[in-house]
Image (cartoon, helix red, strand yellow):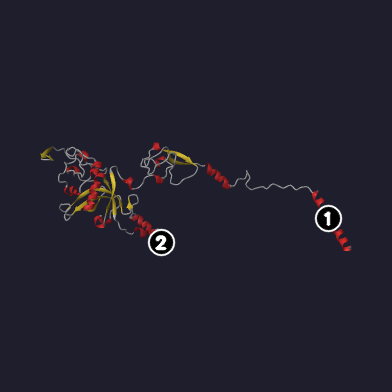
Amino acid sequence: MKITKILAIFLLLLAVGLAILAWALGRQPARTVAPVVTSNTPTETSAEEQQSTHSAKKLYEVVAVNKSIAAGQKLTANDLKIIQIPMEIAETFSAVDEVQGRTAIVTLQPDTPVFDQQLLEGLALQLEPGQRAVSIAVKEPMAAGHHVRPGDFVDVFVTLDAADKSLGVDTQTRLLLARARVLAYGASTVEAPPPTAAQKRTQEQGGSTVQRAGEEQRQRPQAINTAVLAVQLDEVQRLALAEKYGFLNLALRHPDDLSVPDASLFAALPTALRPLRANSVTTVLNSADRAYAGLKMKDLADGGAKAQPPLPKTAVHRSRAQKTVTTSPARTVEVLSGTEVKTVRY
């Protein structure tokens, strides 16, 4: 009983002490919390943010089209303009002169930048008006021992064998094409020619052993099977027939030698398709029409059993690099023999 009283008194005193402590804490003033100061205040901007803000304000000039351009259309100065964009884009152009005169290979939308991959490039740009790039099969014995390089000029000779009874001609070799430009020979082209002797020596002198070994591996002679020639449109069929039924040889020639045969001295070969005015001796077909009309191998081999009269001087098509052969005027007379018309000069 006595212990219970003592415990009750102890708990009473503890409660009084806790009440006094709570009253004392309640009388203390509230503390003020200082504001947290950050390093990126409006007056202290980081260098990265300043550079980002400066870059966002910088504009880049690029070439764009001001109207829709169809694929295959050549770009003129009126089709192009300069626009400003907030970022730099690779494979674009900054000057109109870099794009003017080039041909689009895809449709270009208005107000869009022009990219390099959207414009035509390659061997097609190496052709002159009226020319076509034709590939022929080559072997070392018939291609000047593989000494032909892109950009060279060659004469193409054809050999026809009398053993081929389908031709019905004697064995013959004659000049088929004169001064044809070589656009590509094997993997080398006029745009990416093989390295010269000086370039090879420079590569051998510099670089590590591994690099030199890699260059030597790439420069080893490769099997060359094709050559691409630039020929006139009306000569493509002659080359195709000669390659199929005969043997072609490429004769390398000096680039300053501009001599070519005078086609007006020989009768024009008859076409496979006869034009509507076939009975008129004045009918002269242009290059595209003759290519469309075609040519028979038998006529190419024997000159045509009923060859047409010689072409007028105005009908002889020559490339820019060829000389125009002039002859003194001659008198002619037409001789009618049955259905044949022959022109005799005197």
Out of 203 and 24, give the one closest to the viewer: 24
Q: Position of residue 275 (x, y in %)?
A: 21, 40
- Disc with the residue nearer the chain's start (1 vs 2): 1
Query: Residue 315's image quarter?
Result: top left
Residue at image mark 1: 15
Secondary structure under badge 1?
Answer: helix
Q: Residue furthest right?
A: 2
Q: Residue at x 57, y 46 (%)?
A: 49
The numbered disc on residue 210 is 2
Q: From this viewpoint, is residue 322 visible?
A: no
Q: Say which amino acid is labelled 1.
A: Ala
Secondary structure under badge 2?
Answer: helix
Q: Residue furthest left?
A: 337
Q: CA distance from mark 1 to mark 2?
A: 92 Å
Q: Quadrant of the C terminus?
A: top left
Out of 277 and 207, give the one closest to the viewer: 277
Q: Residue at x 87, y 62 (%)?
A: 4
Q: Say which amino acid is labelled 2.
A: Val
Q: Residue furthest top?
A: 78
